[in-house]
Amino acid sequence: MTVTRIHHGALPALQIDGPGGAQAIVTLFGAHVVSWHSADGRQRLFCSSISKLDGSRSIRGGVPLIFPQFSGRGDGMRHGFARISTWRHESAGAMHEAEACSVELMLTASDLAPEIAAAWPHDFGLSLRVTLQADALTLAFRVRNCGQQAMAFSAALHSYYLIDALAEASIEGLQEVAFCEQREVPPSGAASLPDEVLLRFNDKIDRIYRQAPGPLILRCKDQRLRLEQTGFGDAVVWNPGPVDSAALSDMAEQEYQHFICIEPAQIDAVTLAPGAQWSAQQTVHCEDAEKPI
Ligand code: TA6
């Protein structure tokens, strides 16, 4: 098992070669997991063929790390600055065990561009640990308030899963979970569909499922992923559909058919006292598609 410094597009990145031939690539820009092959050689994450990979804007695909603001829910930068900031990797942070290989990336207030630091004047430490197993990927996110004042934030892992065809995909585990439409700022209420056993996709979807109990199962043809989250209270499900996708300059025509975002998220702000820390994580397991639902 090895961790190698590479370039992904124009971006410095870490390539993790893990157990059984599993491989992941994480760019320092955004601490962004841009590629994940499980041990069977299958790519599990979608990345737009026309995404910028030069640091000029956020990456369209993979796992954007959202912090300290979710979407437009606040006065700050849309989806926050973590996804467009350059993180650090300490080589001592690489960890190899018999069945896992992990790296840790860090971002502190002193790493921020001056204009971003001025707009969010907190002293903080972020850490993302990426752990690769033969058939699983774990992303563990930690936030520490290093300042003297309380610090409030939202966070999410905006994961784009690669699927064969949107119309064939379904998510299990959200039945009876209250949701609201993402564009309701603040959420105006919640509805639940008790008899919605499987969530399927015909057109665009952008929902926040509140207090998602998990695990969630994403199925599409011969693919089955089990998503488990702790610490993140919510789960966001997003696909732009044909119309909104056409308005995205970094997504090619028809690419919306090949991903679904299922995002462990903490939408309501967490407030950390000075010196306190918050952590949350997600593990995605690749499972046998034949397992009964
Ligand atoms: O997580 C869902 C969402 O907030 C959607 O509303 C959608 O716009 C998406 O994120 C992508 O946002 P982005 O800023 O990456 O274009």
Image (cartoon, rainbow, N blue to C red):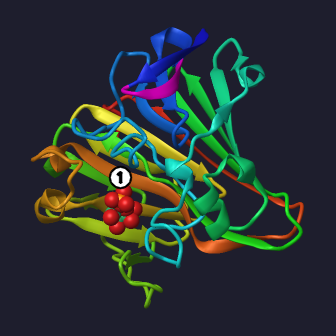
Whether residue 119 is in magenta: the answer is no
- Residue at x 36% of width, y 70% of height: 207
Q: On the picture, is 64 further left or further right than 222?
A: right
Q: On the picture, is 27 further left or further right than 68?
A: left
Secondary element at image label 1? strand
Q: From the image, tell me which residue sits under label 1.
A: 261
From which residue to which does the magenta span run?
Answer: 9-15
- Residue at x 31% of width, y 40% of height: 52
Q: Ligand 1 near label 1 (Cβ, under 8 Å)?
A: yes
Above or below, comparing residue 154 to residue 134 in the picture: below
- Residue at x 70% of width, y 21% of height: 94
Residue 292, located in which quarter of the rendered image? top left
- Residue at x 31% of width, y 72% of height: 195
Q: On the picture, is 136 further left or further right than 207?
A: right
Examine the residues drawn in magenta and state their main secondary structure: strand
Residue nearest the observer in this picture, 52 or 179? 52
User: Three-letter amino acid code at disc 1?
Assistant: Cys
| Residue situated furthest bottom in the rendering | 188
